[in-house]
Image (tube, rainbow, N blue to C red):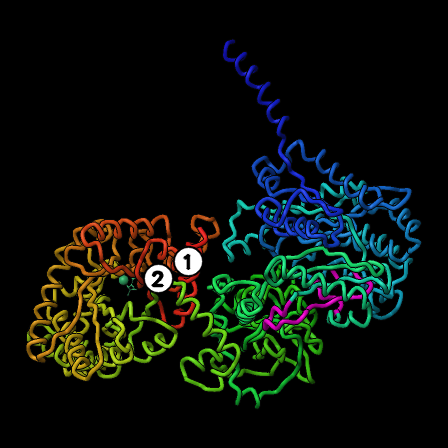
Amino acid sequence: MAKKSSAKKSAKPAAKKSNAKSAQYVYTWGAGKADGNGGMKALLGGKGANLAEMTRIGLPVPPGFTITTEVCTYFYAHKKTYPKELQAQMAAGVANMEKIMGTKFGATDGTPLLVAVRSGARDSMPGMMDTILNLGLNDSTVVALVKATKNERFAWDCYRRFIQMYGDVVLGVQKKEGEDHEPFETVIEGFKHEKYHQDIEDSKLTAADQQELVKRFKALVLERTGHVFPHDPWDQLRGAAGAVFGSWMNDRAIVYRRKYNIPTEWGTAVNVQAMVFGNTGDTSGSGVAFTRNPANGTNEFYGEFLINAQGEDVVAGVRTPEPVLKLKDQMPKSYAELLKVRATLEKHFKDVQDIEFTIQEGKLFMLQTRNGKRTAAAALKFSIDMVKEKLIDWKTAITRNPADQLEQLLAPIFDLAEVRKAKVIATGLPAGPGAATGKIYFNADRAVTAAEKGEKVLLVRVETSPEDLRGMIAAEGILTARGGVSSHAALVARQMGKVCVCGAAALQVDYDKKTVTVSGATYGEGDFLSIDGTAGTVYAGQIKTAPSEIIAGLIHGDKAAQATEKFKSYVQLMKWCAQATKLQVRTNADTPEQTAQAIAFGAVGIGLTRTEHMFFEGDRIDAMREMILADNLGAREAALAKLLPYQRDDFYGIFKALKGFPATIRFLDPPLHEFLPNSTDQQAALAKKLGIDVKKIEHRVHELHEFNPMLGFRGCRLGIKYPEITAMQARAVLEAAADATKAGFKARPEIMIPLVGFKRELDLQVALVHEVAAKVQAEKKVKISYSVGTMIEIPRGALTADEIAHTAEFFSFGTNDLTQTCLGMSRDDSGSFLGAYQESEIMKKNPFASIDQTGVGQLMQIAIEKGRKTRPDIKLGICGEHGGDPDSVKFCHKLGLSYVSCSPYRVPVARLAAAQAAIADLKK
Ligand code: PEP
Ligand code: MG
C-alpha cells in the first residue's frame, strides 16, 4: 500500500514538471524571425540550422519549421513512435506558415498551403530520404490550386510530381530487382509514346496529360502497395516525416555513415517548408549553385538552373540544366539579387556555400545554404584565396583542408605524351578531377565484384542514384551520360575524391546488352576506357598515368610544375603547417630514394627502417639464406660477413639522403622462414646455387615452420638466440655512420630493438650494440653519436615500460603489432571478419588503419606514463601504419608524442593532421 501511494504521489508532480517545461520539438522560422540559429546543427540538422540563420540575416526564405533530431532519437528508442507533444507543436508550425503565406493547409477554397519535406542530418547525407515537394495536394486541393493560380497545367504538374516523389520515397514504389528504370518514369515514357509517339520533354505535357498521369500514378501506387494514395494532407505529412526518420536506418544511409564515420546516435531532423514554385511558367525557375567553383576552386559563381522547373529537376539529372551565369540575360533582376546573396553568404559564413534557390514569377527565394563539398584542389585554393581576401586567417586556412583528402592532390594525372595519342570518344562535364583508367561496368554490384577481384573499374551509368553508392566507392572513376555538375554522381564523386565525368551526352548506354555506344564504336563490359575528370574528356582504351604537379615539382624538381598555382599553394599550406605544428613527422623508409622523397615532402627524419627489406635484393638474399641454413657459428658468421657491406652501403646512402636528420633503424624482425623458398623447384634451385643437398633445405624449412609465426621466433628473439646477427647489423650501421662523419655529413642513427617484452631482452641486445660501437669507434677513430631504444609493440612491453625505460633511450610504438597482440587479432588474416565487425558496429574503424584509442591507446598511455617516470625526457614516437592516419595522428598529438612516422606519400597528410591537432588545442 505504502509503496503504491508514494508512487502515486511522485507521479503527479513529475507530470506537472514535464508540462511546465515541455520539450521543444519544433523550431519555426519565417518573416525575419527564427527560433533556431546556425549554431544549432546538432539539434536542428545542418539544413534546419542554416534556414533559421538565413532568415535571421534577412535573406528571402519561405517560412517553415524543423522537427528536431531529438525526435529521431525518441522515434528509435520508443518503437518508432513520437513524443505526445509533437502533433500540437507541428500544428502550431503549420499555423505559422499559413499566417505568413496567407494560405491554408488542406484548403479546398482559396489557396492551399503546400509544403516541402526534407531530411536534414548534421552533415548532408546522400542515401537518406531527400525531398518531397508539393505535399498537401489531393483531388480536392488541386482543384483549389487551379482556381487560385488560374494555371491548370502548373497545378496538375505539381500534383503529378508529388505522387511520384511520395510514391517513390515514402510508399516505396521503386524499381524492382532487374528493372533499370524507375516505375513512374516507365509510366511517363509509356504515356508519351502512346499519345505522342515520341519522347517529348516533360515541359511539353499539357494539363490534361498531367491529369491522366496522376490517374495512372495512383493506379500504380495501388497496384504496387495495395493501398490507395493518402488523401488527407496531415496523413501525408506524418507519413513523410516518418519516412525521413525511417530513412536514417536504411542500408544506403548506414553504408554512408560507416564510410564517413558518422555516429548513428546523431539522428536526422525533418524540415517542413512552405512551397514556392519554380514551375509556374517562364518567369520562374530553380537552381543550385556554389559561391565558388568546387571542382577547381576558381572564384566564380558556379551552378546551374532550369527555367520553369522544380528543384529536383536540376539535381536529378533528367533535364540538362543551363549554367547559372545565363540567368544574367534571362532574368537580370533576379540574377543581380542572387549575386548579392552570394556575397552576403560568404561574408556571413566565411566559407564557400552550396545553395539552392527558386525564382517564382521573378521573385528570388533561398531554400538552402551549407558549406560546399569540394575537391582537395578546390579546398586548397579556397583556403589560400580567403586568407588573401582577409575572410579567414592562416590557422583557419589549415583547418579548411581535410587531411584525409590531401592525397587527392598527389593523385596521378594522364601521361601527357600518351594522352595526345589517345582517341577522344566523348566529352562531358568535369565533375571530379584526376585521371582514371579501368574496365567498364554498367551496374554497381558487378563493379563491386570486379573490384574485389582486383580489377580497376570505371562505373558507367546513364545517371547515378544513391543505390549506386557501393559501386562508386569501388570504382576508380565514374562516367555518366546525363546530369550536371550538381547531379548525384558529381556530388558524391567530389566528396569521395573520385574521378568523375558526367553528362557525356554522346554515350548511348544499353543496360540490357551491357554496352555503351559512342563515336561509332561499341564497348562491352570489361573493355577499357579512360576519363579525365579535370577536363571532362572520355578516351578509348587504357592510358598511362603521370604524377601530379605537386609530385613532379617536389620529387622530380620539375620547374614548370613548380611554377603552377597549385604547387605554390601547396607549399604555402605546408609552410603554415610547419608554423603551427608541435608533433614532428618522420617517415618509414628503407632506401635512399624513399628517404629523399619523404624529405622532399617535409619529413624530418626516419622513424622506421625495416632492415629486413634490405636482405631481399639481388645476391643478398643468397647470403641471407646461407646464414639461415648455416649449422654452426662459424658458417653463420661467414655468411653474415657477406651481408655486412650491403647493409653498410645502404645505411650510408640513407644517412646521406637524410641530410643530417635522425634515422631510427630497426634490427631484423621477421621470422626466418620468410627468407627461405617454399616450393620444391625453388628449393632445388637454391640447393644447386649454394652447392648443398636439397634435403638440408627441406629439413630447415620444416624446422622453421611455425603455427603462429607472428607470435613466434621473430623480433629480438632472433638476436637473443643468434647474437651474431645483431652484432653484424650494429657494425653495419655504425661503420656507415663513421664513414658518413668522415665524409663530412652528419649521421644520427637510433638503433631500435624490436618486439621487446622483458627488460633483460633489451639489456642483452643493447650491451652487444655498445660493445660493437666501442670497437668500431676505436677502429675508425671517430666518435659516433648514436642511441639505442626499443619498440613498444607487445602489451608486456607497454605494461613494464618503467623497467624497460632504464635501458631504452627512446620508445617507438609499433602499433601494428601492438594492435594485433592487444586485440588478439592477426594483422594478416583478420580481414575475414573485420568487415562484419564494422558492420555490427563492434568497432567503428579498421583497428589496423586507425588506432583503437580505447584499447591500444590505453596501452600507449600506460607506456608513456611509466616510461616518463623512469626517464622524463624519453623520446616517443609511433611507426605503425597508423602514423599516416589523420585521426591517429591527432590522437598521438594528444598523447604528447614527439613524432609520428609514416610512408613517404602520407607525410603531407600527417603534417596537415598534426598542424590541425595543434590548432584545435589553441581553440580549446
Ligand atoms: C609495428 O609493429 O607497428 C611495426 C612498425 O613493425 P612491423 O610492421 O614491421 O612489425
Ligand atoms: Mg612490429
Instruction: Give the class, few, some or many, for how many residues have Cα within 10 Å of label 1's Cα (few <14, many ≥20).
Output: many
Q: Secondary structure at mark 1?
A: helix
Q: Amino acid at mark 2?
A: Leu
Q: Secondary structure at mark 2?
A: loop
Instruction: Give the class, few, some or many, for how many residues have Cα within 10 Å of label 2's Cα (few <14, many ≥20).
Output: many
Foreground residue, 204 or 904?
Answer: 904
Picture coordinates of residue 911, whole percent (x, y): 40, 66
| 314 in magenta | yes
* For residue 130, above or below residue 593: above
> Which span of residues is magenta-colored?
292-321
**Visible residue check, residue 83:** yes
- Asked whether the beta carbons under mark 1 and mark 2 sit within 8 Å of each other, the answer is yes
Most frequent secondary structure within the magenta stretch: loop
* For residue 210, above or below residue 96: below
Circle count: 2
Indicate which quadrant contains ligand 1: bottom left
Picture coordinates of residue 460, whole percent (x, y): 62, 71
Residue underneath mark 1: 917
Picture coordinates of residue 852, whole percent (x, y): 37, 52
Residue underneath mark 2: 583
Q: Amino acid at mark 1?
A: Ala
Q: Residue furthest top?
A: 1
Q: Residue furthest front?
A: 390
User: Residue at 87% across / 63% down in the picture?
Assistant: 205
